[in-house]
Image (cartoon, rainbow, N blue to C red):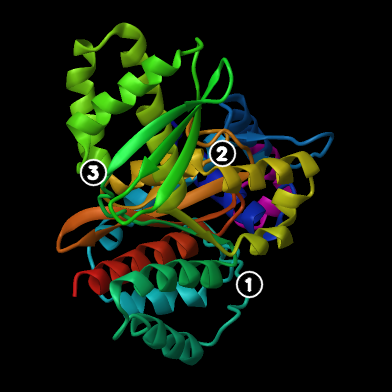
Amino acid sequence: MLDERAHALLQAIVERYIQEGSPVGSKSLSSLFSLSPATIRSVMGELESVGLIHSPHTSAGRVPTPKGYRLFVDHLLSSNADKFNQDFNLEQDFSQALLQDLFCEIKIDSGRDVAKEPFMTQGAATDLAASLVHAFDGVDPKTAFSTAVDMVSELTKFAGVVMIPQPSQVVKHIDFIQLSKTRVLLVIVTPEGDVQNRIFYVDKEYQSSELQYAANYFNQHFSGKSFAEVLTALSSELNQLQSDISHLMRAAFEGSVQAKEESESVHIRGEHRLLGVSDLTADMDRLRQLFQLFEEKTELYQLMDVSSRSQGVQIFIGGDSQLLPMGDMSVIAAPYQLNGKIIGALGVIGPSRMAYQRVITIVDVTAKLLSKAVSR
């Protein structure tokens, strides 16, 4: 448990690092506190010993660790809990967020303020906030999703992501085709005539008669049901089938349907904006990891799914969250509602070094505007 002085110093280090992007030394912090550089170095040593900051390479300065960022944002969320959990004045919240630079202002209660000039005047921020709040006026629910994800991407200069609820798609009939000893093709046909092909892996080679039996059983019992109904029914009926056929059906629908839902329900916009973020692009391996995340979407789906089942803003910090193993990256997401019921989540993907209060407010307010738009 940090004492008040250590907590204030951690906050100063995180905000200074977010603002300047270089390791923070004791001398630069002494202007914010009525403390000697030696005392500040001592407190920084305590913060480093508990894993909240560290020294990159041979630098004398310190930077936040994922654990340090986590403590910082948890304090930020708790101190603004009332604001993030209620509507209040969305236009005013937007205006205040727009006045903050993309990187945090330094504000330390126990010392003097050292702040960058806002990149927008009060009048310009007020006018822009008003236009953003009304950006959803007259927009149909389907268009509202793209409006929201484009808005958070444009305002934060990061990538936007939205999880959209999918309609319950109905299955008319299926077929299984053996492609090799370990691969089977699942062919799904909908009542509208749409055909979807899914390849999945098995641990044995099936006979044609076994594949035909499995397809016939499915078509007899599940034709006309939605994917969700199929998965629910399969879980209770698979025990009645031969073990090999049971394994085939489970592998086909638990894997392929999940992959379909994950890829189609998570939409990303503004990925190109991250190419201008040096924290993410300085390392080519990290850049490849980032775009692999966008392509596969599985981890993003899990993050957005957690957010859509939670109340309030959720923050995932790379290296701290098990759902986001990639370091130097954060995802901020907030749920949105349809007539009071949470149905999805909206968020941004950016570097760990971001202006959290600004981005949190933008995501939170936009999610509330999206809720109003889809509930009309």
Who's the residue at 35% across and 45% down the image? 189
- Residue 363: x and y in percent read 41, 63
Q: Please check the rendered image and state whether residue 30 is part of the magenta-colored stretch, yes or no.
A: yes
Of circles 3 and 1, which is in front?
3
* Camera-nearest residue between 161 and 53: 161
Are the residues tagged 3 and 1 within 8 Å (C-beta)?
Answer: no
Q: Which of marks 2 and 1 is in front?
A: 2
Q: Which of the two labelled residues, at mark 2 and mark 1, occupies the earlier sequence position? A: 1
- x and y percentages locating residue 75 in the rendered image: 40, 46
| Residue picked out by circle 1 | 116
Q: How crowded is mark 3: few (under 14 residues within 10 Å), some or many (20 or more)?
A: some
How many angstroms separate mark 2 from mark 1 (CA)? 27 Å
Residue interval drawn in magenta: 26-39
Closer mark to the observer between disc 2 and disc 3: 3
Percent position (x, y) of residue 96?
42, 75
Q: Toward the viewer: 221 or 313?
A: 221
Q: Which of marks 2 and 3 is nearer the N terminus?
A: 3
Tell me the distance, in whole angstroms, between the alpha carbons under discs 3 and 1: 54 Å
Look at mark 2 in the image and give the residue it sits on: 318
Residue located 34% across and 79% down the image: 92
- Looking at the rendered structure, the secondary structure element under dot 2 is loop
Residue linked to disc 3: 226
Q: Residue furthest front?
A: 209
